[in-house]
Amino acid sequence: MPDTSRPFQVLPAAAARVTDLVRAVPDDRWRRPTPCEGWDVRALVNHLTAEHLWAPRLLAGESLAEVGDDYAGDVLGDDPVAVWHHAVTTSLLAWADVAPEDELREIEVSSGPITLREYADQMLVDLVVHAWDLAAALGLPHLPVAEAVHRATEYERPRTGHGQGIDGLFRPAVPTTSTDPLDRLVAMLGRDPGWGA
């Protein structure tokens, strides 16, 4: 397994998988339900896009108050694919500028202060898991980035405790007999690996 000790190193590849799926959304499938309860495909892509619009500003030192509600509500407009592409490109450029010595610098997010390394881990988990969500919702094949799945699993395993989930983020773990690493990750985070099958 390649070195995944720095989540920054696998963000671009994980983001590329999401981009492939966003580009593949047919015009008539933006309102399809996803494994994220209450979110259709558009809402899920909107969530990811807003996250990546936030990232460059937080990495540049802006506070939550300074960003405010700039990305509240619908950020996708009439061209969701173009807006996603702009957001993720800008985000990845900002992440690429994070030097190793800055990884333990703290920023403020909605849950409180975290290091840039942890922020990158959280962004990576969202890319990996929501790529699975999109593929499942659209019935499209999905080839995950093995290194990203491994890193996301290593980050989330201690946070999810004994399968109890994380309030406000993930439901309790779903039992699975699958040996596929991505299936096991999404099950750990409260998703049924067989959703929509």
Image (tube, helix red, strand yellow):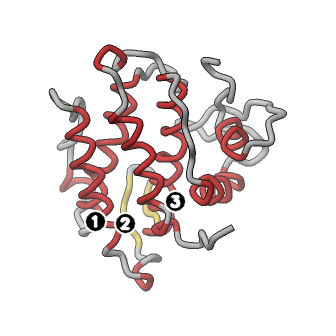
The residue that disc 3 covers is: 121
The residue that disc 1 covers is: 93
Q: Is residue 32 above or below residue 182?
A: above
Q: Under tag 2, what secondary structure?
A: strand
**Image coordinates for residue 117, horizontal then vertical, percent:** 48, 69
User: Would you say 132 lies left or right of 80 here?
Assistant: right
User: Can you tell which quarter of the image residue 155 is in?
Assistant: bottom right
Q: In this rendered view, identify the residue nearer to me: 34 or 63.
A: 34
Binning the other alpha carbons within 10 Å of mark 1 as few (below 14), some (14 to 19) or many (20 upward) gives few
Identified at 28% across, 61% down, the residue is: 58
Q: Give the mark nearer the N terminus: 1 vs 3.
A: 1
The residue that disc 2 covers is: 107
**Image coordinates for residue 139, horizontal then vertical, percent:** 52, 22
Binning the other alpha carbons within 10 Å of mark 3 as few (below 14), some (14 to 19) or many (20 upward) gives many
Q: In this rendered view, identify the residue nearer to me: 92 or 43.
A: 92
Identified at 36% across, 17% down, the residue is: 29
User: Would you say 172 lies left or right of 123 here?
Assistant: right
Q: Give the mark nearer the N terminus: 2 vs 3.
A: 2
Binning the other alpha carbons within 10 Å of mark 2 as few (below 14), some (14 to 19) or many (20 upward) gives some
User: Can you tell which quarter of the image residue 84 is in?
Assistant: top left
Q: Under tag 3, what secondary structure?
A: helix
Q: Under tag 1, what secondary structure?
A: helix
Identified at 33% across, 21% down, the residue is: 26
Count of number-bearing discs: 3
* Kind of residue at badge 3: Asp
* Kind of residue at badge 1: Leu
